[in-house]
Amino acid sequence: MLGLKSASAASLASITNQSTALAGGHGNLSQQISLKASAAQHRGGRKNSMSVKCQSTSSLPPPPVDTHVTEASPSRIQRAEFPAPDRAAPQKSGKRRNFFQQMAASALDHIERTVVRHIESQVPLPSTADPRVQLEGNFSPVEESPVQHELEVVGKLPANLQGVYMRNGANPRFQPEGGHHFFDGDGMIHAVRFKDGIVSHCSRFTKTYRLRVEEEEGHPLFPKAIGELHGHGGVARLALYFARSLAGIVDSSQGMGVANAGLIYHNGRLLAMSEDDQPYLVRIKEDGDLETVRKFDFDGQHHKSMIAHPKIDPATGEMFALSYNPLMPPHLYCFRVGPDGKKAPEVAITLPEATMMHDFAITKRFVVIPDQQVVFRMTEMLKGGSPVIYNPEKMARYGLLPKYDNDESRIQWIEVPDCFCFHLWNAWEEGDEVVVLGSCMTPADSIFNESDQPLRSLLSEIRLNTTTGKSTRRVLAETNLEAGQLNRSYVGQQNRFLYLAIAEPWPKISGIARVDLQAEEGVRVTKHLYEDGCYGAEPVFVPRTSDPNAPEDDGYVLTFKHNEKTGRSELLVLDASSPSLDLLATVKLPSRVPYGFHGTFVSEADLAKQSLE
C-alpha cells in the first residue's frame, strides 16, 4: 500500500506540478498500494453491474455496518450506522492550530468538496474501488467491542488451550466519501482469550497516527491507498494531502499506515502491521483487552516500513523482514532482529523497478525474495490508470540471499516464468534445490484492477536449482487456497502439513483445507466445509504442546466463522491432526466479526514474557 511518509517540504510542493516530483515527494508513496490482504481478500475480481461515480458522501449510500449482535433480524443487523464522529471534540494531541492553519484547513476542505470530488466524479468507479461492492455484507465494518467474559461454548474446549487468538482486518472508522478498497480500512484486531476455562472476547482499533488525527477532525484526511489513488483523482488526492502536510494540518513524518494486515509476537511484543508503515506495538492486557502503545521503531533502530509477513526462525528466534520503497532506489531492504530485540545491519537489494512484495520466505541458509510481475508505476495515474500494474514483459524471478550477508553481492536470481505468488507458505533446502510453497495467482493484478477472468490462486511447488540456475513449478491442488499457516516450528524446514483457507467463491472462504504433502498417494487435500451461507477466515495452527518431539500436526486449528443468514459470528476450534479437521468446540461471539486478514496465537507462557515497554 502506498505509504506516503517522509520527505522535504520542497519535494512535497513540487508534487502538484509533475509526475516525477509526485514520486519523489514521499519516501514511501506506493507502499500503501501493496496488498495487505489475504484471508478475505478484496472483492476486486468481481464486476459491478452499476456504474457508480465518486461524488460527495451524500451521493453514495452508506455501506451496511453493524455494531453488536442482537435478536433483531439479519437485515437490521447489517444496516446499523458508522459511529457518529464527534466533530466538536478537542484535539487529543493537545496541539492547537494557529490562525493560518485554521484558514488553510477550511480552504483545503472546500477544495476537496468542490474540486477533488469533481475530478473524481468524471470517471465511474471500478468495482475494485466501489464501497458498495467492497463493503458489502460481512465485509462491512463494526464498532469496537469491549471485553466480554464467560462466553458460551458449545462442545468441549481442550484444557491446554491457554492464550489469546487474534486476527487483524480492515475496518473503516468513517463512511467512505469516495472510492474505497477493502484493503483501505483502519486496522481492527479481534481477540479471543482462553484462560482457566473462561473465554473472553474484544475488538479494538489499532490507534495509528492516521486514525487518531481523523478521529480528532471527525472526517477522513488521508488519501486511501487503493480506492482513491488512481487516475487524475489520485493525483489530486496526493496534492491535497501534501498541501495539508505543508500547512501543518497533518504530519507526514508520522506516516499514514493503517496497521490492518498482519500480527506477529516477537521478543515479548505484539506488532500490528501493514507494509505502508512501521508496525504498531499493541499490549495484551490482563483482562484480555487490547491497547495500542505506540508506533514501533525497534527502539530507534528501524525507520523504514516493514511488510506484514515477517518470519521468525524457530531455530534462532530471529525475526527476518523486508521493507520496500516503490519510489526510491534500490527499492528493497532486508533486515533481521534478534530474539533480544537488536537489529542487525540491513541489506539494500537493487531492483530494476519497484515491485509489489507482500510476502517472502526463509530457509536454513537463505532469504527467499520474490521479484514478480506486479509493479508500481506512479506515472500511470497521469494516464488515468492505477499505479499498480501487471507487466507482461517482465520475467518473474526469485532471489536467494544468504541470511547473514551484509550486502547483496552474493544474491542468486533464478527466473520463474509467469509466476505471481501473493503468499508463500514455506521454503526449505533439498540438496542443490530450494523448495518454495506458495499460492500462484492469476490474473496477477486482479486484486487491484478489474478483470473479466475468474481469479485463481493455486497451491504450487516451485523448485529453484542453485547449480543450474533453473526452476520448475507444479500445481499441487486445483482448489483456490489462500490465507493460512503451518506449524510455525517448521518455518524454513521441510514440513508435511499446511492449513489453508478454501477461497471459493472468491473472495469468501467456504472452509478449511488440510494439505498433506507426504501422503501415500502424493499430495492429499481434505476439507472441512462450512454449511450453506457460512464463511470464514484464515486458519491459525496452535500446537498442543511445546514438546519439540511432538508430531507436526499435534494441535488445533482456530478460525472465525460467520453465518450470513443469522448475522452471527463464532470461533471454531478444530482438531488439526484429524484429516477432516473435526470440530472440538465452538465459541459463540457477542458481536459480528467481519471478514479480515491474518492472525496469530500467543500462548499463556509467551504472554507471561510480554514486555510492558
Image (cartoon, rainbow, N blue to C red):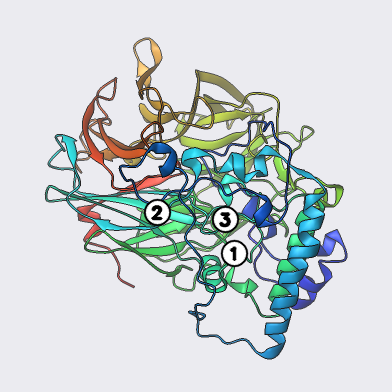
Q: What residue type is labelled 2?
A: Ile
Q: How far apart are marks 3 and 2 (CA)?
A: 19 Å
**Contact? badges 3 and 2 (CB < 8 Å):** no
Q: Is residue 578 above or below residue 3?
A: above
Task: Give the mark nearest the N terminus, 3 or 2.
Answer: 3
> What residue did someone put label 3 on?
175
Is 598 or 94 nearer to us in this picture? 94
Residue behind mark 1: 256
User: Mark 3 packing: few (<14 Cα in 10 Å), some, or many (20+)?
Assistant: many
Which amino acid does the dot numbered 3 rest on? Gln
**Residue 54 pos. (x, y %):** 72, 50
Whether the residues at callouts 1 and 2 have beta carbons within 8 Å, the answer is: no
Residue 94 as seen in the image, left or right of residue 191: right
Residue 152 found in image quarter: top left
For label 2, the crowd category at 10 Å Cα-Cα, with few meaning under 14, some 14 to 19 and many 20 or more, is: many
Q: Residue 68 versus residue 422: which sits nearer the camera?
A: 68
Left or right of residue 604: residue 469: right
Residue 52: x and y in percent read 72, 42
Give residue 461's position: percent from left, percent from top.
52, 25
Determine the CA span between mark 3 and mark 1.
18 Å
Q: Give the vertical position of 81 relative to 550 (above or below).
A: below
Residue name at image x 57 percent, y 39 percent: 42
Q: Residue at x 76, y 58 (%)?
A: 117
Is any atom of residue 28 visible in this view? Answer: yes
Q: How crowded is mark 1: few (under 14 residues within 10 Å), some or many (20 or more)?
A: many
Which residue has dot 2 on it?
189
What amino acid is labelled 1 in the image? Met
